[in-house]
Image (cartoon, grey):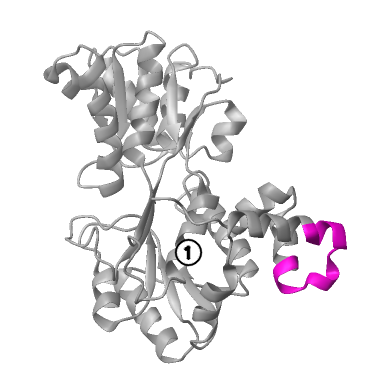
């Protein structure tokens, strides 16, 4: 299905920033006539129509979208959530919408916060992140008829195509398949996967991408692939120690693909630049050390979330989700392995 044009698309066609497009839409008098003409031409060319969708949300109560500010587990994985929030806030502003951040201790506390804000008319709709198996938040929101969109698929429940549960996600299966296929094409054969323990919706999806490509093209047996499947909780130290233990057990591998940049950095610290390591998320840390990684297009995620959250409930002609393809970024690391 063809994706609806966004503010980002208009800016690219017109050769201007997102903020300039927003100014043309909301305060055209502050924009130079020639620039305004280019933006208006791009809007007409793309068929971009922001006002009707934005008005549907504005006519509720507050023109405000609520999203939980996740606790930062560490400076690597936390940057993904931060970048998503930044993009969501910028794009919401172009529609005249506001983002309200709130904190919660756990999913049940998040539900209590959502109830309070919705009943107080502070927030019209919510964006949820960190979806999980049997997510109680989505079940409660559907039951109470509160509009929401999740960044992340529903895992383990039968609402993958439920029109009341709208979601946007990045295709982790494709991301790890691309990473694995690249390494196989480079002549690497024994490619290990370093990921999180099951059950993990996101982690298991990424693991399947590695496994499917390895079964298709590596020539290794299932037993050999099982030995190359390394599982550990997220973290740099955890990734390093798991790879160290695998080497000490006699495991041999030519390359490693990982479920996160945190795990990939740990693996890279252990094996050094002579064994290719590919992470996931393309965080600033990956860029700083020259580590290959799978990049999540967070601007597209934010755009998809806003498009779905402003879609009228009666619109049944469009599916209620967006699955976005990531891209592989290849670099050459500058780290040396640890000594001793």
* Residue 23 part of the magenta-drawn span: no
Q: Is residue 82 left or right of residue 140?
A: right
Q: Position of residue 210 (x, y in %)?
A: 29, 28
Residue 217, located in which quarter of the rendered image? top left
Q: Is residue 249 visible?
A: yes
Q: Nearer the viewer, residue 35 or 61?
A: 35
Q: Is residue 283 left or right of residue 263?
A: right
Task: List the single residue furthest toward the bottom.
Answer: 120
Residue appearing at x 19%, y 13% in the figure: 220
* Residue 33 part of the magenta-drawn span: yes
Q: Nearer the viewer, residue 239 or 279?
A: 279
Q: Position of residue 87 (x, y in %)?
A: 58, 57
Asked if 321 appears above or below 119 in the picture, the reply is above
Crowd class of label 1 (few under 14; some 14 to 19; many from 20; radius 10 Å): many
Q: Nearer the viewer, residue 300 or 227?
A: 300
Q: Position of residue 108 (x, y in %)?
A: 29, 74
Q: Is residue 196 visible?
A: no
The residue range painted magenta reads: 24-37
Q: Position of residue 17 (x, y in %)?
A: 73, 53
Asked if 316 appears above or below 230 in the picture, the reply is below
Q: Nearer the viewer, residue 55 or 85?
A: 55
Asked if 94 appears above or below 17 in the picture, the reply is below
* SS at badge 1: helix
Asked if 49 appears above or below 208 in the picture, the reply is below
Instruction: Name the image quarter holding the C terminus.
Output: top left
Which residue is the site of mark 1? 307
Residue 104, located in which quarter of the rendered image? bottom left
What secondary structure do most residues of the magenta stretch adopt?
helix
Residue appearing at x 30%, y 22% in the figure: 192
């Amino acid at each position: 299905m063809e994706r609806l044009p966004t503010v980002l698309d208009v800016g690219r066609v017109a050769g201007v920033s997102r903020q300039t497009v927003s100014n043309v839409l909301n305060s055209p008098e502050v924009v130079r006539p020639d620039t305004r003409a280019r933006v208006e031409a791009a809007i007409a060319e793309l068929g971009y129509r922001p006002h009707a969708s934005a008005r549907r949300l504005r006519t509720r109560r507050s023109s405000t979208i609520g999203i939980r500010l996740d606790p930062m587990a560490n400076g690597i994985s936390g940057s993904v959530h931060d970048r998503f929030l930044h993009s969501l806030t910028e794009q919401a502003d172009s529609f005249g919408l506001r983002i309200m951040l709130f904190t919660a201790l756990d999913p049940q506390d998040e539900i209590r916060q959502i109830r309070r804000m919705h009943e107080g008319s502070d927030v019209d709709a919510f964006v949820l992140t960190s979806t999980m198996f049997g997510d109680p938040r989505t079940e409660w929101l559907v039951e109470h008829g509160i509009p929401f969109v999740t960044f992340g698929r529903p895992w383990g429940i039968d609402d993958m195509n439920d029109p009341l549960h709208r979601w946007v996600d990045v295709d982790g299966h494709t991301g790890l398949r691309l990473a694995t296929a690249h390494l196989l094409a480079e002549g690497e054969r024994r490619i290990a996967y370093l990921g999180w323990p099951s059950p993990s919706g996101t982690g298991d999806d990424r693991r399947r991408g590695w496994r499917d490509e390895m079964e298709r093209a590596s020539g290794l047996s299932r037993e050999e692939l099982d030995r190359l499947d390394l599982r550990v909780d997220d973290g740099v130290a955890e990734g390093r120690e798991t790879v160290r233990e695998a080497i000490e057990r006699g495991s041999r591998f030519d390359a490693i693909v990982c479920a996160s940049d945190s795990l990939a950095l740990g693996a890279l610290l252990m094996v050094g630049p002579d064994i290719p390591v590919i992470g996931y998320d393309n965080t600033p840390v990956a860029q700083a050390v020259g580590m290959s990684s799978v990049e999540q297009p967070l601007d597209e995620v934010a755009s998809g979330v806003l498009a779905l959250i402003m879609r009228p409930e009666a619109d049944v002609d469009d599916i209620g989700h967006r699955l976005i393809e990531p891209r592989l970024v290849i670099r050459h690391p500058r780290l040396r392995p640890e000594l001793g």
